[in-house]
Amino acid sequence: MKPPFKDALPILERLEQEGFQAYFVGGAVRDSLLNRPIDDVDIATSATPKQVQELFQKTIPIGIEHGTILVRYNNQSFEVTTFRTESDYQDFRHPETVEFVKDIELDLSRRDFTMNAIAMDRNGKCIDPYLGQTHIREKRIETVRDADERFCEDPLRMMRALRFVSQIGFQLGLSAEEAIIRNQHLLRNIAVERIAAEMEKLWKGSYIHQALSILIKTEIGRSLPIFKDHDSLIEACLNRISTPFHSLPEAITCMHLLHQEVSIDEWCKLWKLSKSVKNRCHQLTRVYHYYQHQGLKPETLYQLTPDMIPEFVHLVLILDAHSSLSIGEVEHDYKLLPIKNRDELAINGHEILALLPDEKPGPWLRTFIERIEKQVINGSLPNDKQQIKEWVKKWNRQEKS
Ligand code: ATP
Ligand code: MG
């Protein structure tokens, strides 16, 4: 058994000792069968949330109404969820009724895709009533039970299907694909934040190109903010994007630069993205514009922070098909910058004012510092307090004469 499961094994054993059933379920089982890195190990059990709380010393009721208790064990956290079924989906929101059940197969029947509906016991034996393992071997995403019904119940599943395509490169089963074409309009009823969370995973998937072509084929774009009003945007994405983005801001910046009719602010407003995402998009756009106008000059590099370099280089490679820019080249040139930000400038506003007794503080000072900063960055003035002071005094003399 692989390490993340081994760590959780004592929880399964404890539950079984008390006469409950317990299995590993969800993404961890799927990823293990796919030989992909395993994230969180989730556990499903016949014990009720209250029984789980009584059995383990450290528990946090993170979603008790849905049956989920977080169990802390050996400084690790495991989500333990009571077997449940869901029904009465109203207005395409979360299910109205959650019913705890005693049978793992009933629990598996509520899950979205067959590859996500496999339970594994503590000996590694799989319970797989919907042929998830076969579909994994055939690299196919199939819904558990009728695709139209499952997508109507919870339209977000259509976005999940697409992000799994992007993450693991599977095909969509024919019935799932056709059902998405019929039901994509229902995504308009889903909170945009939830769609954005899936979209973020889609942008970062290794098989993004495959996911984008299915996005077009299934017409899901017709139900997504911005894409629905800009047909050419998604075509442009398909033509240009074949490698994963590092982050959501990088993806949004790329969309904006590919199709400048839609501003960053509009993207962030309509997709309800956070302020920090928005700020990062503006930062990336600024660097890109510097690069467009003057190439990889010190002033361009100065707009970067080290963690932005991979995103910046990727954007350049997408937007300029002829570019051969590399991360190594940018990192090398970045290291040569005399200063990396204004705090590193050898002089500050007070020191400048002290040299210019006739001047009063004001907005001019900022412009003046920027002038010094620019010269230091491009190497025409050394970042040395004394030499900068000399330059300021000389400037003052020239101003006065
Ligand atoms: P990831 O690796 O991204 O976490 P995951 O498959 O574990 O992928 P989660 O969102 O963590 O996805 O959900 C855990 C499990 O819960 C899924 O594997 C699936 O069985 C079930 N599930 C999650 N969302 C839905 C949904 N909208 N409808 C039905 N089942 C779902
Ligand atoms: Mg998960």
Image (cartoon, grey):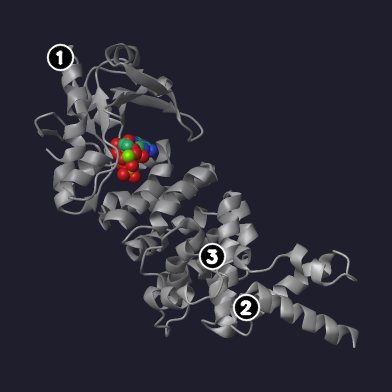
Front one among 153 and 100 = 100
Seen at 39% across and 83% down, the residue is 324
Residue that numbered label 3 is attached to: 253
**41 w.r.t. 226: above or below:** above
**In terms of secondary structure, where does tag 1 sit?**
helix
The first of marks 3 and 2 along the sequence is 3
Mark count: 3
Q: Quadrant of the C terminus?
A: bottom right
Q: Quadrant of ligand 2?
A: top left
Seen at 48% across and 33% down, the residue is 93
Q: Closer to us: mark 2 or mark 1?
A: 2
The first of marks 1 and 3 along the sequence is 1
Seen at 53% across and 42% down, the residue is 191
Q: Tell me the tag on residue 114.
A: none
**Type of amino acid under label 1:** Gln
Q: Is residue 393 visible?
A: yes
Residue 123 placement, left or right of 397: left
Q: Position of residue 50 (x, y in %)?
A: 34, 12
Residue that numbered label 2 is attached to: 376
Q: Quadrant of residue 41?
A: top left
